[in-house]
Image (cartoon, rainbow, N blue to C red):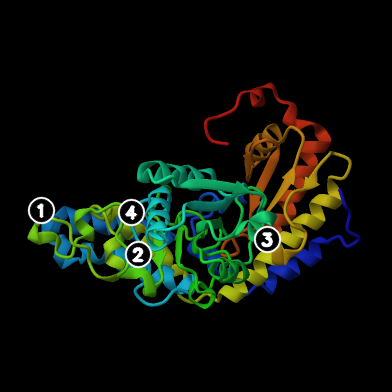
């Protein structure tokens, strides 16, 4: 483990929190006072306003308006309305983002649409740092199409070389879920286009973590979940982006009634709606969309540049403190050391990492574990303080130094790690 000379004092930490322009945002979240929560890259905290909104939807909209609420409370417009809010956070053009279905389903939509725009090619190119569900869905799409499509998986550094005239779709997660490695969207998209390929970007660990510029990078498609940095709640619906230049040229693989040109004509033949609306499939999940709609309001007065600046500072603080305190315990930085090459998370290779993380959680520091040996910490600047990060490093040191991870109960793995 590489060491760093600078250490932070309690006075340093207090000064950082006092000067933090995002510190007041913490008051907008339901933050348990006893908890240091460094897992917002897996499930974000609940914005306080969500509880009242969901209560209102239950009691007044569903409870009193019933079926009339589809019109009187504009339930049917939620996918586009919420999508527009996300679009502003990811640099998307107007009317190019919709919130619908899950990330996995949206991957299938985007990949199949991309293949339809490149009918003479058969390769879906991705890398082995991609989240497995993306690869599974691409494999499923290839199998269903039955036209000899294949999924080619390479190392992240080999993507550029692998882009040749056989590649129909390049499918990449911008920030790798395990190490936080960040791909250069502009450069990789340009290379893909030069090779004649269509791009599908997974923004699950990007949206709400730092500035994204889909339009400026000329991306073709993008998908992402909303329950991480966007704080939409467990299992909240995902989003899909389609560049305006492609919207009326694609025929969705999944053709549900809400994506029909006139859903309430009940035509027996599918006619796709215009633009991004054709990416809808089934009835919008109103409760989940309403919660997400309100959760996104916390971003109204937030600068993404300020979010990124604090994210980098939190990550640097954590690396410094962990490496200074935990040397000799076998930890090795798994994330890129250069902040420009990573998202808003820090991962360490850690012997007995699962047990160490269980001990951390039992001592009120929540991160998570990824096979085979990665302990992972997410830094969500809207509600994580510098004091949180400093104290998390101290607790990690205590657990390693005192062997608290050796508790026999940690030998049994829980369903979710």
Q: Taking the image as drawn, is residue 180 in sight?
A: no
- Residue 8 pos. (x, y %): 83, 61
Question: Could you give the CA–CA distance between mark 1 and mark 2, rounded to whole angstroms?
Answer: 25 Å
The quarter holding residue 292 reads bottom left
Q: Do the residues labelled 2 and 3 touch (CB within 8 Å)?
A: no
Callout 2: few (<14), some (14-19), or many (20+) C-alpha neighbours within 10 Å? many
Give the residue number, with chain letter if any, for mark 2.
98
Label located before the other in sequence (2 or 3): 2
Identify the mark nearer the N-term, 1 or 2: 2
Q: CA–CA distance between discs 4 and 1?
A: 29 Å
Q: Residue 342 carries which label?
A: 3
The mark lying in front, picked from 4 and 2, is 2
Q: Residue at x 52, y 31 (%)?
A: 415
Image point (76%, 62%), residue name: 316
Q: Earlier in the sequence, mark 1 or mark 3?
A: 1
Q: Whole-percent x and y of residue 346?
A: 69, 53
Disc marking residue 288: 4
Residue 24 appears in which quarter of the rendering? bottom right
- Quadrant of res 185: bottom right
Dot 1 crowding, Cα within 10 Å, few <14, some 14–19, many 20+: few
Q: State the separation of the CA atoms marked 3 and 4.
A: 30 Å
């Amino acid at each position: 483990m590489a060491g760093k000379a600078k250490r932070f004092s309690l006075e340093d930490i207090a000064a950082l929190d006092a000067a933090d322009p995002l510190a007041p945002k913490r008051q907008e979240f339901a933050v348990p006072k006893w908890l240091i929560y460094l897992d917002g890259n897996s499930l974000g905290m609940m914005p306080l306003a969500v509880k009242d909104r969901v209560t209102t939807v239950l009691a007044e909209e569903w409870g009193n308006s019933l079926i009339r609420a589809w019109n009187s409370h504009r339930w049917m417009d939620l996918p586009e309305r919420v999508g527009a809010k996300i679009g502003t956070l990811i640099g998307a053009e107007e009317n190019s983002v919709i919130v619908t279905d899950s990330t996995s389903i949206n991957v299938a939509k985007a990949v199949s649409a991309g293949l339809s725009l490149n009918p003479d090619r058969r390769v879906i190119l991705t890398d082995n740092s991609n989240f497995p569900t993306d690869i599974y869905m691409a494999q499923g799409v290839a199998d269903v199409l039955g036209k000899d499509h294949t999924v080619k998986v390479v190392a992240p550094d080999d993507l550029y070389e692998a882009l040749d005239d056989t590649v129909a779709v390049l499918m990449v997660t911008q920030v790798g879920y395990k190490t936080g490695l960040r791909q250069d969207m502009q450069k990789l998209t340009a290379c893909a286009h030069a090779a004649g390929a269509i791009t599908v970007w997974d923004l699950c660990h990007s949206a709400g973590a730092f500035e994204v510029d889909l339009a400026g990078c000329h991306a073709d498609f993008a998908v992402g979940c909303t329950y991480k940095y966007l704080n939409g709640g467990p299992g909240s619906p995902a989003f899909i982006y389609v560049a305006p230049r492609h919207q009326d040229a694609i025929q969705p693989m999944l053709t549900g009634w809400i994506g029909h040109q006139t859903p309430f004509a009940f035509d027996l033949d599918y006619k796709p709606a215009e633009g991004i609306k054709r990416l809808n499939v089934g009835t919008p999940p109103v409760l989940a969309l309403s919660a997400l709609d309100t959760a996104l309001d916390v971003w109204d007065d937030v600068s993404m540049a300020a979010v990124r600046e604090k994210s980098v500072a939190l990550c640097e603080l954590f690396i410094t403190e962990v490496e200074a305190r935990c040397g000799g315990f076998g930890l090795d930085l798994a994330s890129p050391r250069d902040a420009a090459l990573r998202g808003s998370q820090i991962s360490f290779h850690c012997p007995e990492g699962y047990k160490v993380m269980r001990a951390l959680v039992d001592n009120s520091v929540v991160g998570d574990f990824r096979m085979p040996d990665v302990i992972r910490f997410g830094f969500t600047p809207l509600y994580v303080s510098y004091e949180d990060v400093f104290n998390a490093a101290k607790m990690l040191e205590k657990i390693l130094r005192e062997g608290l991870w050796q508790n026999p109960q940690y030998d049994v793995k829980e369903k979710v790690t």
